[in-house]
Amino acid sequence: MNGWLSHLSIKRKLFFLATPFVLALAAAFTSLYVGVEEVKVNGPLYKQIAQAKDLMADVLPPPEYLVESYAITLEMLVETDRASLDALILKSKRLREEYELRHSYWEKELPEGELKHRLTFSAYQAGRAFLDVRDRDFIPAVVAGDLNKARQLAITALRPKYIEHRTAIDQVIALGIPWQKQMEEQIATVIQSYLRQGILWTVVFLAVAVFIGLSVAKSITQPLSIMCKISRDIAKGEGDLTKRVPAEGHDEIAQM
């Protein structure tokens, strides 16, 4: 390497020496920057964790868990004030709108798998059947004052569908909690991976920089040391100018 370096000017040698340090810093910065981009707020992994938390919020409870809708349905059986009954009916409709809205969201956003199937199919189908019977048969019976029919529907139609829906929701929770934990562990793994990459590239470029630095230093100091020695010999020889300094390369020292 010294032979090649001897053809470079000292300015180019110093520039060549600085390059690996710049590359080391650039590699470390790039690795850390990419890692931060992966896990930053609103980054791809952050969104997955946010989805997991949103899912738990939706099913514990509502809108995706119909426990409040079921409770309001039972309240309708004992409510005697028409204004209060109308308020319960209105609230039940609003809860259904939220239920359908969040179902559409999770059907689109959740990755394919058992968790999505349990939430968007098993729990949804039972929940929708419950809501259909309530809106089509149960509420009209309550409004008409036919409480016997309403109670019969609550026992034979609404309760079984609600239990089926709740069972599916329990399965969603059982699957969702490990999924959320997995996302959090994935973020920690990604951070560690990028940190290791940054450290590795920094060490590699610094090792190259040290090797180049030693070579550059030697290419500069070695001919200077030879010149100093010969100059001392000339001085000791009382002006013997027959001694010559070997000039190798084309840098400033060789030209001098």
Image (cartoon, helix red, strand yellow):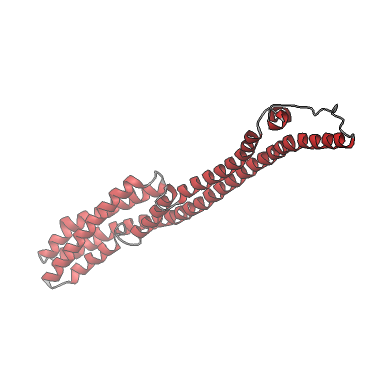
Q: Which of 52 and 193 is in front in this view?
A: 193
Which residue is situated farthest in the front direction here?
239
Whole-percent x, y for residue 100 in the image: 25, 52
Q: Which of 10 and 182 is in front in this view?
A: 10
Vertical order, 128 against 86 (above or below): above
Tell me which residue sits at (65%, 43%) in the image: 206
Q: Where is residue 226 in the image (x, y as percent from the top left)?
A: 81, 34
Who's the residue at 12% across and 73% down the image? Answer: 81
Q: Is residue 200 above or below residue 173?
A: above
Asked if residue 194 is positioned above or below residue 66 in the image, the reply reads: above
Is residue 154 rendered to the left or right of residue 19? Answer: left
Using the image as rendered, state which of residue 177 and residue 128 is in the foreground: 177
Q: Residue furthest left?
A: 144
Residue at horizontal 62 percent and vertical 40 percent from the top:
18
Can I make out residue 147 in this image? no
**Residue 179 appearing in the image:** yes
Query: For this rendering, which residue is in front, 221 or 106?
Result: 221
Q: Would residue 81 be found to the left or right of residue 58 on screen?
A: left
Q: Quadrant of the C terminus?
A: top right
Residue 117, percent across and down?
Answer: 37, 47
- For this orientation, the residue located farthest to the right is 237
Where is residue 93 drawn, in percent x and y?
19, 59
Task: Specify whether 62 is left or right of 15.
Answer: left
